[in-house]
């Protein structure tokens, strides 16, 4: 079953985040995920949004997501993401 990863980021160190972003695709392309959106200016339709960036990805299933998220390559670059931004990361199941 497809899973969706929704990430809301608040930048704390742009240089660190930019280092992460520069290396992201080299790691991401090794896995079966799809980057659906990476928007630093999403339209707020309702409510208040206090973040700086929204990222939306999909993976064929939770196993594929976990393979990416727990891979040594991703864990290495994610240090810069964690140093560069606070994040809320959600994993949502798609419809079967």
Image (cartoon, helix red, strand yellow):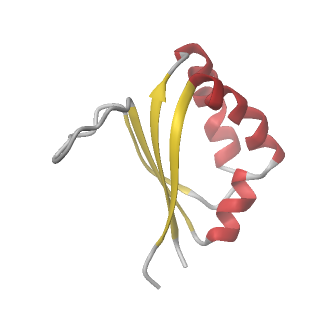
**Quarter of the N terminus within the rendering:** bottom right
Q: Residue at x 64, y 69 (%)?
A: 62
Q: Nearer the viewer, residue 25 or 93?
A: 93
Position of 49 relative to 65 (above/below): above
Residue 84 is situated, as x and y percent measured from the top left of the image, at 58, 23
Left or right of 1, for residue 66: right
Q: Residue at x 79, y 50 (%)?
A: 71
Residue 45 is situated, as x and y percent measured from the top left of the image, at 16, 46
Residue 23 is situated, as x and y percent measured from the top left of the image, at 66, 31
Question: In the rendered picture of this protein, how many numbered marks are placed on residues?
Answer: 0
Q: Residue furthest right?
A: 72
* Location of residue 27 by image quarter: top right
Left or right of 67, for residue 81: left
Q: Nearer the viewer, residue 40 or 27?
A: 40
* Location of residue 25 by image quarter: top right
Position of 90 relative to 25 (above/below): below
Q: Nearer the viewer, residue 22 or 10?
A: 10
* Location of residue 48 by image quarter: top left
Q: Residue furthest bottom?
A: 96
Q: Residue at x 74, y 60 (%)?
A: 67
Position of 83 relative to 2 (above/below): above
Left or right of 3, for residue 37: left
Left or right of 92, for residue 83: right
Residue 68 is situated, as x and y percent measured from the top left of the image, at 71, 54
Q: Residue at x 64, y 24 (%)?
A: 83
């Amino acid at each position: 079953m497809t899973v969706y990863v929704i990430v809301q980021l608040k930048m704390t160190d742009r240089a660190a985040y930019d280092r992460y972003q520069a290396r992201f695709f080299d790691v991401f392309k090794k896995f079966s995920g799809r980057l659906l959106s990476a928007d630093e200016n999403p339209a707020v339709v309702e409510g208040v949004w206090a973040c700086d960036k929204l990222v939306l990805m999909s993976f064929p299933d939770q196993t594929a997501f976990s393979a990416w998220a727990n891979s040594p390559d991703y864990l290495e670059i994610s240090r810069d993401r964690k140093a560069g931004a606070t994040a809320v990361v959600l994993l949502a199941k798609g419809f079967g």
